[in-house]
Image (cartoon, rainbow, N blue to C red):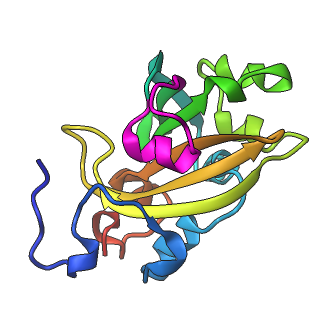
Amino acid sequence: MLIRDPMLPAALHPDSLWRPLEQLVLPPHIRDWMADPASLTLRLKRYGQFRVVPGYHAISFPRADERQLLSLAPRRAALIREVTLLLDDTPVVAARSVLPLTSLTGANRSLGHMGSRSLGLELYKRPTCLRDQVWARIGSPAEAMPVCWGRQSRFIKRGEPLLVAEYFLPALWEKVGATSVSSGLL
């Protein structure tokens, strides 16, 4: 259960709704990171030693909101991959990828076997992916994790869709020198 901060405008209270990024008014520093069309991995590498720590990795059924964004039928499985991105051994991004099994065929098969490699780097290899939609929200990537800004992107790689949600943890703002961005929310 998320606790609402009475100091946040109603539209910014933690919730489970992803909103189109272009509909949100965000602090400039946050918008700069959320709207960046380039590889998050490459951007993070500018600030320290980058590493991917694999977490959950299984073929499962996506959540209802994820199925809707992927136009996936209710009983269609996907590869769900959750990782933490670290800079200098500090967790800065929590990420969740949803890759429909139908998207993991042919040349896209390698996307299902990333291990501790960055999915972002693979998505931007030729042929590069198309990021056709970006949504944002304030929420928690998982229970016992802080409430923070998150973005979810739908990518098309070789004609096949996949989702990547990235939550910018409070430590990221410290690492990139954004001390005026208190815990990444305001």
**Can you name the residue that lies furthest to the right here?**
126
Q: Position of residue 155 (x, y in %)?
A: 68, 48
Q: Quadrant of residue 32?
A: bottom right
Residue located 54% across and 77% down the image: 22
Which residue occupies the foreground of this view, 51 or 143? 143
Q: Position of residue 6 (x, y in %)?
A: 9, 76
Q: Position of residue 141 (x, y in %)?
A: 33, 44
Residue 69 counted in the magenta span? yes
The answer to whether 107 appears left or right of 36 in the picture is right
The answer to whether 179 appears left or right of 112 in the picture is left
Q: Quadrant of residue 34?
A: bottom right
Label tally: 0
Above or below 121: residue 52? above
Q: Position of residue 132 (x, y in %)?
A: 69, 59
Which residue occupies the foreground of this view, 119 or 68? 68
Above or below 158: residue 109? above
Residue 77 counted in the magenta span? yes
Bounds of the magenta segment: 62-79
Q: Quadrant of residue 178?
A: bottom left
Residue located 21% across and 37% down the image: 143
Visible residue check, residue 88: no
Above or below 48: residue 112? above
